[in-house]
Amino acid sequence: MARMPVRPYHHGDLRSALLVSAERTLLEKGVAALSLRELARDVGVSHAAPGRHFKDKQALLDALALAGFERLAKELHTADAHGLPLEARLTQLAQAYVHFAVTNAELLEVMYTRKHDADIDERLRAAVDGTTTHFVQIVADAQERGEMIPGEPWTIAFVLGAALHGTASFAAQGTLTPEAAVAGIPALVHHLLNGLKPRENEQ
Amino acid sequence: MARMPVRPYHHGDLRSALLVSAERTLLEKGVAALSLRELARDVGVSHAAPGRHFKDKQALLDALALAGFERLAKELHTADAHGLPLEARLTQLAQAYVHFAVTNAELLEVMYTRKHDADIDERLRAAVDGTTTHFVQIVADAQERGEMIPGEPWTIAFVLGAALHGTASFAAQGTLTPEAAVAGIPALVHHLLNGLKPRENEQ
DNA sequence: ACCTGAACACCGTTCAAGT
DNA sequence: ACCTGAACACCGTTCAAGT
């Protein structure tokens, strides 16, 4: 009476099972606690099995980073309300980014580690470029409507990007509480748009 | 004929020798390549010797982070030319920060890792608070001279801090070349001060 | 094609013992 | 007070062999 084996010899989709388990570990215990051997144990395969799907540990981290960038891109896209006035629109985008940063702090660290394989680098660059282009496009459109100053859209977008990235990093790091980070966004965006120098009759 | 032993039993100042060697490794090979055992080998002591001076690897990283923050604070202080007009002054400070980031990219990563011991946390917080206060003070002074908009100095300083931190992170990560990062600073500061919205006769 | 088991060369950390 | 040497429990990676 042969029963279905609880765990067949072939896992079926070990690769994605490892990624899912890895992201869970990342969320619960952090990057430092991520080991291929433990991952293999969690998933119920031998410690050498992951080697079939990821040439080394960095390859797994690269895959996690890529998935992270793709998810971030999607969340930003979803958060982008085209109809809203510029300031409200940017505020919403910024909040989405910071929200991602605080709920995926450890993943963000993996994403921002500049040790990526040449192979994945291309796909990664594509994902990053996607969101970059998104921001640049928003700026270009705003410029066309006269809602932003003229000049290289990329240069303008960089100001927004840097400020957002900085805020997200502070939040992910714990320099700011998640609540404080999100709560500070509207003022941040307002100041970015209106400047820190007084607006009227200055010498 | 007893010679002076090349390496006496007591190292003399093993603690700082380890830190010096660690920072060298950080610069040349990155955090990932930093191992206590290799450090011990480099310095010429047994692999267990570091344990006398650092309770674990994290303690050594904490010490590196602390030293990093203190050095950054000093460099920012040196770069701060009080006499300069506001925009030039901020530009110079920003360039100093980004310069530190690109020449100490791996150290920056250690500094920004939010896994610090409670003991060192106090001293670390002091170092970070020092530079934070520095920036807040610059803002408060500028406000008094009417060169910055009114409002919580901390909130205003946060805009500058986030943008700078973001730029520094991009630079340290390699998203930007060091040259591009430094070259972009003047425009960044200008836009932060003047805002991204057109200045005159809007709606 | 995919996985296992053993093997290798590394880790960090601890602890009795040496100086 | 400071360091060593051995020991322990982990790693990542490789590779013949199994299914």
Image (tube, coloured by chain):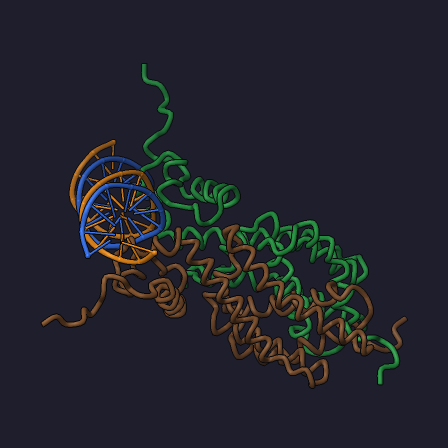
Chain colours: A brown, B green, C orange, D blue
- In the image as oriented, which residue stretches furthest toward the top? B1
Instruction: State whether residue A66 is above or below residue A183.
Output: above
Observer-nearest residue: A123 or B53?
A123
> On the image, which quarter does residue D5 sit in?
top left
What's the residue at 53%, 44% (across, down)?
B27
Left or right of A86? Residue D18 is: left
Q: Position of residue D15 (x, y in %)?
A: 29, 41
Instruction: State whether residue A136 is above or below residue B36.
Output: below
What's the residue at 77%, 68% (across, down)?
B193
Looking at the image, can residue B129 be seen? Answer: yes
Observer-nearest residue: B93 or A63?
A63
Left or right of A12? Residue B134 is: right
What's the residue at 57%, 78% (across, down)?
A182
Observer-nearest residue: B101 or A71?
A71
Q: Quadrant of the C terminus of chain A?
A: bottom right
What's the residue at 81%, 65% (across, down)?
A151
Q: Position of residue A183 (x, y in %)?
A: 58, 81
Q: Position of residue B101 (x, y in %)?
A: 60, 53
Q: Position of residue A133 (x, y in %)?
A: 67, 67
Q: Quadrant of the N terminus of chain A?
A: bottom left
- In the image as oriented, which residue stretches furthest toward the left? A1
> On the image, which quarter does residue A201 sit in?
bottom right
Looking at the image, can residue B66 be seen? Answer: no
Left or right of D8? Residue B25 is: right
